[in-house]
Image: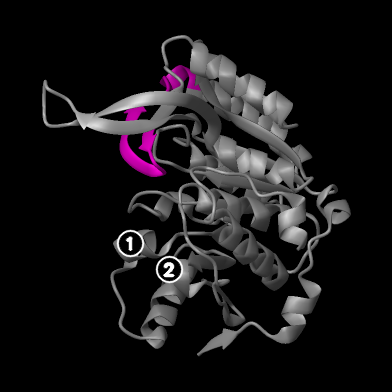
Amino acid sequence: MVTSMTTAALETSQYSKEAFSKSKVLVVGDVMLDRYWFGDVERISPEAPVPVLLVGNTEERLGGASNVAINGSSLGAQICLMGVVGLDEPGRILKTMLEKSGVKAMLLEDPHFPTILKLRVIARQQQLVRIDFEERPSSEHLSMKMDLFEQAFGDYDVVLFSDYGKGSLEHVSEMIAQCKAAGKLTLVDPKGDDYEKYRGASILTPNRSEFKQVMGSWKTEEQLVEKAQTLRNRLDLKALLLTRSEEGMTLFSEKGAFHVKAQAREVFDVSGAGDTVIATLACALGAGYSMEDSVSLANKAGGIVVGKLGTAVITPEELAS
């Protein structure tokens, strides 16, 4: 049976920037830049039946694993980001933004690889189209990244793998195995339907649709518990955290199922919400919070960030309120 979050859990899961400042997290994954064009649409193109956007302003934000990193840094944790970028304008912008955000960047530069870029065109707070620029990093640079990882991961309390399916985590199985052998806590935000590569991770954090893609649908909570525990045992995970949108999130472990309800908020944009959730979870665990209290904080953080437009960062003041 799914157990509800107790009052005691709520009382003890209070955010502390001082505690978070002791948390050391290495984020590894698909580094990308999110670019926004904001404007107004007042006419249809004479060339084709499409709206004409008059761009008023532009904005750039860190996305993917980069968004995970700055969410953790914003909460006061010591964050290092490892990934691959290109020798191009988006790559330069990305590195500058990371530096300003207090994130330590260990980024390999691949001259033959364009920095992953997502361009969103928005009119009156509505997204009209998203344009992606991406390629897979070269095998040479992924091997270099593996070497860099082997040298660096021992300095961190928690290793977080942010998988967006863009190819940067080709060696994730080996990385997880090394972390497990060293007794490191590992969190994975998964992608795709092959979860075998995440075997041995400490915590896997699929959302509802990702979990359904791997384990199929369910009609009752009992069926969900059975499927989640089956996957957890199959992959030798300590825990599986299922994020369930308006239904909150449920942590499955050997103790059973621990559920926290979604906080009642107006959902404006879910872009990057999973980044905020796993970043908060990793930082809390690195700061010494219990699994249940870390999940409660992550749930609160996710509830806050969905009220913002696009990929966004949660602030200490928001999480402490």
Which stretch appears magenta?
A: 120-141
CB contact under 8 Å: marks 1 and 2: yes
Q: Residue at x 32, y 30 (%)?
A: 131
Q: Residue at x 41, y 33 (%)?
A: 167
Q: Using the rendered image of the protein, determine whether residue 244 is visible from the camera's viewpoint.
A: no
Q: Residue at x 61, y 31 (%)?
A: 82
On the image, which quarter does residue 104 sit in?
Answer: top right
Q: Nearer the viewer, residue 65 or 155?
A: 65
Q: Is residue 84 left or right of residue 151?
A: left
Residue 187, percent from left and from top: 59, 53
Q: Which residue is mark 2?
A: 231
Dot label at residue 214: 1
* Front disc: 1 or 2: 1
Q: How many marks?
A: 2
Pick whichever of labels 1 and 2 is earlier in the sequence.
Answer: 1
Residue 229, percent from left and from top: 47, 75
